[in-house]
Image: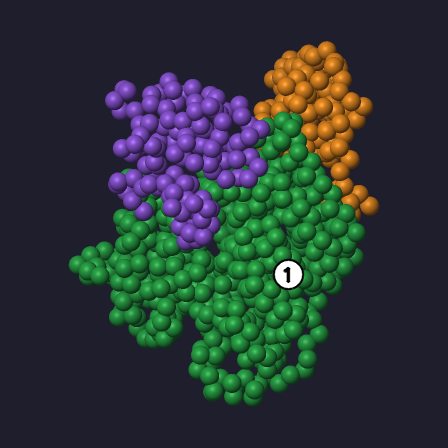
Chain colours: A orange, B purple, C green
């Protein structure tokens, strides 16, 4: 799955994601965790120290739970890498970034239809008025 | 099974104009129900729909709709929703398909008439 | 009135370009129809039975004459010469071509209007009391609140892909004209013990397949906590609202299944944990927005207008219109005019290009340049001098806009129904037209008194049938249109869901059934001033059920 960041599409080796349940079974550092839309974020918080990457699943681009999960993780102090992973479209890229995601892992089919310039365009849109004001 | 089968056509809305279209026998699209390709069995219906589904660059939301056939073998809608789709708003007969060609208004079904 | 600042202007223009790009990407295959659909919906574009439909927001129902003229221009240039007012303070164009929609949005942006979030599973156009800023019974103008919510909710990155649509309404008066208890969130302005203005927050109201009256989640919310509290509610809903069944996805179901106490606890916990100051607008910004809604400069006028009284004496028709279609204004010498968009035999809420232009002219000359769109599909002139009523009435009459039926039996709410809507299961408009014709006699209509008929062409209840004194719901039964009647609904601060009377009626049987119902009411009411709703509450369903199903009297 290509990873979209501000630098372009990166084809990284698939991270060795573990589940939330497996978190409690290991004390190793630098873990990558994949979480679903019904995750209890507060159950992950005690393990933040050993997590370097959290990927939040988007089973469909129309399922917006991941955006709130990202905000929640940030509020609880997670400062590792945060990825949205699954069916996300270019038009949602700015929203994903605004909610705290660092990048988006998309499938090859979407990457083919929506090349990087479409993601860049989405990220460069004028912010809605309220967000401009809150940004100072 | 085949005895119970109601003839079907594929209908959709045109991507650009938004109006009602029907798949014709050449797997293109027509605005006239009379020119629609008619499926007489399940297999033919599935095949028609399969030809329609990938045509996203032309139409939106293709689906199978029941029709009945008049004495000349021309299709007409059986469900009142589909009847409205062949015409336009019933309160504004000056608008929609009915306004363009009122004399060629699609025939009504014998029952459940509106 | 609110004017766009540089942020609004730049954003709305850029948004048009974004949508233009999305249309092109749909055509070139970058976006599938499944992906494009929510994007076009969030820009107000539906695909209906016969054509596309563009739903334009009229935020909190407020319009200037310039904006009304732009709506008229759009109707004639890109549509078919008319527009349809909706129950959520929007106007719909029924015939735009896809390629023209970006140009229409551009024309709207030129007059500080848009179609953003008038559809989709996001926070929709925020509605408010259509008498806001004019009503004599008002605590505070609800529109600054609605405008603040509009800004906050516009492309809120977290809340664009909610489980389902989310509707917010605000009222500043104890007499609720904004149907706040049938919204996902209703805000009612109240004062606390110290006299401070704030909100009672109602959550989980809604009509549709499972109607619920909203419940109070917070009885007093200080104004400064508005956005943080809304953000807390929306976050709880986004994370916990059901996504497995579209008919169970609204927040009303979450409230119902969770229970209001537990839901309140979830919201309050989220509210405590979030960083309020990072969400709330700065005080100066709130004050800046509020200043836009300062009342116009009214003339000092006496309470009594002798010009008006003379005109009423001279013209009984005019007098009748004044009685039904005007309401008390907070400023002496002024009144609020309800312009009926329910002429007998016309589609409820439809306005022609010419009518829109006339309304703009009248507002400009006699109405402090303000117009409102009501959820009851009428147009309001909020600030008219009593002295000018005669001339305003004459101008309206010339345009077919002087029907004296506000709140009467022919002032029917009707959704577009199966004449236009892809979701509809039956027609609404012709049912309304038939009932209007039956009660076309203004003397008879007036004798019947306040009588709210609301018609929906499907279970989604855009026509608010659940809260009509008489509700009519069009369904399909055995291949034909069938209409269920509900009685005793109420859309005001005493919101009630109507009771289903019994089996449905065929299309042609609805009008005669309503006639029997009205005859029964006239014979049963305690006096001429007892409204149908009050008689119904006093006597219950039975006598009216008998009248509705008394088929021996159907011979017509």
Q: Nearer the viewer, residue C284 or C325?
A: C325
* In the foreground, A85 or A55: A85
Q: Is residue A5 left or right of residue C33?
A: right
Compared with A120, B47 (above or below) is above
Quadrant of residue C513 in the image?
bottom left
State left or right for residue C479 relative to residue C157: left
Q: Nearer the viewer, residue B72 or A105?
A: B72
User: What is the crowding at mark 1: few (fewer than 14 residues within 10 Å), some, or many (at least 20)?
Assistant: many
**C471 left or right of C366 in image:** left
Q: Residue shown at 66%/37% (left/top)?
A: C158
Answer whether residue C530 is visible to the viewer in this image: no
The residue singled out by tag 1 in the image is C69
Residue A87, x across and y down, in percent:
62, 24
- Residue at point 63% right, 27% down? C29
Quadrant position of the N terminus of chain A in the picture: top right
Q: Residue at x 66, y 34 (%)?
A: C24
């Amino acid at each position: 799955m290509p990873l979209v960041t501000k630098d372009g599409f990166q084809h990284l080796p698939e991270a060795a994601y573990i589940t939330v349940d497996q978190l409690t079974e290991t004390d190793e550092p630098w873990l990558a965790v994949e979480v679903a839309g019904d995750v209890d974020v507060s159950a992950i918080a005690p393990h933040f120290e050993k997590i370097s990457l959290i990927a939040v699943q988007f089973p469909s681009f129309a399922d917006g739970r991941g955006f709130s999960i990202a905000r929640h993780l940030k509020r609880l102090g997670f400062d590792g890498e945060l990825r949205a992973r699954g069916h996300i479209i270019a038009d949602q890229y700015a929203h994903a970034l605004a909610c705290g995601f660092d990048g988006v892992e998309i499938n090859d089919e979407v990457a083919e239809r929506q090349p990087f310039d479409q993601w860049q365009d989405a990220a460069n849109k004028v912010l809605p008025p309220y967000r401009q004001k809150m940004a100072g | 099974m085949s005895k119970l089968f109601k003839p079907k056509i594929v209908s959709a809305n045109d991507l650009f104009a938004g109006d009602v279209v029907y798949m014709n026998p050449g797997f293109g699209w027509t605005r006239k129900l009379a020119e629609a390709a008619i499926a007489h069995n399940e297999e033919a219906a599935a095949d028609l729909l399969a030809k329609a589904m990938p045509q996203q660059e032309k139409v939106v939301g293709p689906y199978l709709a029941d029709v009945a056939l008049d004495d000349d073998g021309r299709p007409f809608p059986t469900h009142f929703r589909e009847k409205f789709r062949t015409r336009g708003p019933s309160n504004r007969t000056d608008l929609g398909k009915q306004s363009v060609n009122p004399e060629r208004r699609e025939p009504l079904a014998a029952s459940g008439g509106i | 009135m609110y004017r766009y600042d540089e942020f609004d202007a730049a954003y709305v223009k850029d948004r048009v370009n974004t949508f233009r790009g999305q249309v092109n990407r749909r055509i070139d295959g970058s976006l599938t129809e499944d992906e494009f659909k929510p994007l076009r919906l969030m820009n107000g574009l539906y695909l209906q039975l016969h054509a596309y439909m563009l739903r334009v927001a009229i935020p909190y129902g407020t319009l200037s004459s310039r904006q009304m003229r732009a709506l008229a221009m759009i109707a004639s240039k890109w549509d078919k010469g008319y527009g349809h007012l909706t129950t959520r303070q929007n106007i719909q164009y029924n015939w735009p071509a896809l390629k023209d929609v970006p140009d229409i949005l551009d024309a709207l942006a030129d007059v500080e209007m848009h179609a953003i979030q008038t559809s989709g599973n996001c926070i929709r156009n925020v509605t408010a009391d259509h008498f806001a800023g004019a009503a004599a019974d008002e605590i505070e103008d609800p529109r600054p609140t609605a405008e603040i919510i509009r800004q906050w909710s516009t492309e809120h990155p977290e809340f664009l892909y909610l489980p389902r649509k989310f509707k917010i309404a605000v009222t500043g008066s104890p007499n609720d004209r904004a149907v706040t208890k049938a919204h996902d969130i209703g805000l009612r302005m109240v004062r606390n013990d110290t006299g401070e203005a704030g909100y009672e927050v109602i959550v989980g109201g809604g009509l549709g397949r499972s109607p619920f009256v909203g419940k109070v989640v917070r009885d007093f919310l200080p104004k400064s906590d508005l956005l943080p509290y809304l953000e807390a509610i929306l976050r709880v809903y986004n994370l916990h609202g059901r996504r497995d069944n579209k008919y169970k996805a609204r927040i009303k179901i979450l409230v119902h299944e969770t229970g209001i106490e537990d839901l309140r606890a979830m919201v309050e916990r989220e509210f405590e944990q979030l960083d309020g100051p990072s969400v709330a607008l700065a005080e100066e910004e709130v004050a800046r927005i509020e200043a836009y809604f300062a009342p116009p400069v009214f003339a000092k006028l006496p309470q009594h207008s002798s010009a008006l009284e003379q005109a009423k004496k001279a013209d009984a028709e005019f007098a009748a219109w004044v009685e039904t279609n005007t309401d008390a204004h907070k400023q002496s010498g002024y009144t609020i005019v309800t312009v009926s968009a329910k002429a007998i035999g016309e589609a409820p809420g439809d306005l022609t290009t010419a009518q829109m232009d006339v309304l703009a002219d009248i507002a400009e000359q006699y109405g402090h340049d303000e117009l409102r769109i009501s959820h009851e599909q009428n147009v309001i002139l909020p600030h008219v001098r009593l002295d000018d009523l005669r001339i305003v009435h004459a101008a309206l009459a010339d345009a077919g806009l002087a029907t004296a039926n506000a709140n009467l039996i022919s002032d029917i709410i009707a959704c577009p129904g199966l004449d236009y809507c892809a979701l509809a299961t039956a027609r609404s408009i012709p049912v309304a037209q038939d009932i209007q014709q039956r009660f076309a006699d203004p003397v008879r209509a007036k004798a019947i008194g306040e009588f709210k008929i609301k018609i929906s062409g499907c279970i989604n209840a855009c026509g608010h049938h659940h809260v009509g004194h008489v509700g009519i719901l069009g369904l399909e039964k055995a291949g034909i249109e069938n209409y269920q009647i509900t009685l005793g609904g109420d859309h005001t601060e005493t919101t009630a869901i109507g009771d289903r009377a019994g089996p449905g009626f065929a299309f042609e049987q609805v009008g005669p059934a309503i006639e029997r119902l009205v005859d029964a009411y006239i014979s049963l009411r305690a006096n001429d001033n007892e409204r149908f709703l009050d008689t119904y509450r006093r006597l219950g369903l039975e006598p009216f059920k008998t009248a509705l199903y008394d088929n021996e009297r159907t011979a017509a």
